[in-house]
Amino acid sequence: MSLRIGVPSKGRLMEKTFEWFGARGVTMARSGDDREYSGHVSGIGGVHLVLLSAGEIPRELSAGRIHLGVTGTDLIREKLGGWETRVAEVAPLGFGFADLIIAVPNAWIDVDTLDDLDAVAAQFRAAHGHRLRIATKYHRLVREFLQSAGVAEYRLVDSQGATEGTIRNMTAEAVADITSSGDTLRANHLKILSDGLVLKSQAELFAARRANWDAITLARLSELCAKLGVEAPAL
Ligand SMILES: Nc1ncnc2c1ncn2[C@@H]1O[C@H](COP(=O)(O)OP(=O)(O)OP(=O)(O)O)[C@@H](O)[C@H]1O
Ligand SMILES: O=P(O)(O)OC[C@H]1O[C@H](OP(=O)(O)OP(=O)(O)O)[C@H](O)[C@@H]1O
């Protein structure tokens, strides 16, 4: 059986992943034109490339339909409850850096910390009759983070994109989203709470604990890890 490795199917994450493996003698390429989601691996035998959305890779790893996968730490932790029991970290890849943060409007001059947010949230509920809304797609991570910080008077509203626009659109009062350059936050007049860093993320190579590991796939894993210069994970 070949070792199935899931890799982001488009954009910067795909290109950087191809570069990272290529620099270590494992060449990945998409077949056909840009719209064809199939590919191949050379430089090592018995490894099958599976091109997937970065957001779907955690689920495919968890189900064991791929043996290895490249995706963001944020997506693994958000999408897989008890992620350590489902995947093993093989190697951080040094790209795809992003911080998951909590941000509020610049105009909230008295709000700089989570404690301030908590105070404003209580006032907000008293004044408006509903809880302050935080727009995000990272429900699990934000809930856990705010719970451990003691912030309770809020409601998460789902936003799967253009999250920073929800405040202007009046569907939320605050946001929890990833930032890398900070341009999107600046353009939308938002500031990060000083203690509002939920998670630092980067692209990582993960192994599926529940995949069908047999002697052949384990041998291929060792060979691949040796070639990549990383330690083979204990599964
Ligand atoms: N500036 C950035 N914008 C978006 N994602 C980034 C950025 N920097 C790093 N990332 C990381 O890239 C990953 C998301 O990649 P991508 O947007 O391709 O995923 P996706 O959810 O599968 O997207 P799509 O649904 O459009 O296919 C996350 O792990 C995220 O942390
Ligand atoms: O700090 P920056 O460099 O500005 O990057 C952050 C932005 O990039 C991502 O959005 P993406 O482009 O993936 O689009 P989305 O709004 O559909 O999530 C993220 O959701 C932020 O909006």
Image: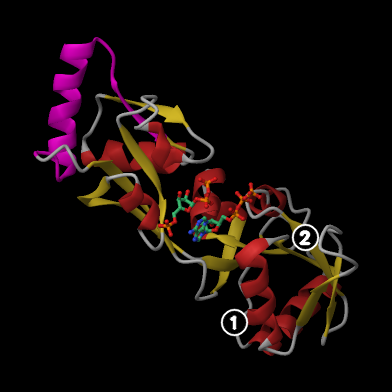
Residue depicted at 35% across the width and 38% down the height: 175
What is the x, y in percent for residue 78? Answer: 50, 46
The answer to whether residue 206 of the structure is visible from this angle is no
What is the x, y in percent for residue 187? Answer: 35, 50
Label 1 environment density (alpha carbons within 10 Å; few <14, some 14–19, many ≥20)? few
Q: Which mark is residue 231?
A: 1
Query: Mark 2 and mark 1: span between their CA atoms?
Result: 24 Å
Q: Which residue is mark 2?
A: 51
Front residue of this view, candidates 216 and 169? 169
Q: Nearer the viewer, mark 2 or mark 1?
A: 2
Name the amino acid type tagged 1. Answer: Glu
Residue depicted at 41% across the width and 61% down the height: 180
Q: Is residue 113 magenta?
A: yes
The answer to whether residue 47 of the structure is visible from this angle is yes
**Residues tagged 2 and 1 counted as in contact (Cβ below 8 A):** no
Could you tell whether 143 is left or right of 227 in the image? left
**Bounds of the magenta span?**
110-135
Number of numbered labels in the structure image: 2
Name the amino acid type tagged 2. Answer: Leu
Of the two numbered discs 2 and 1 on the same chain, state the one appearing first in sequence: 2
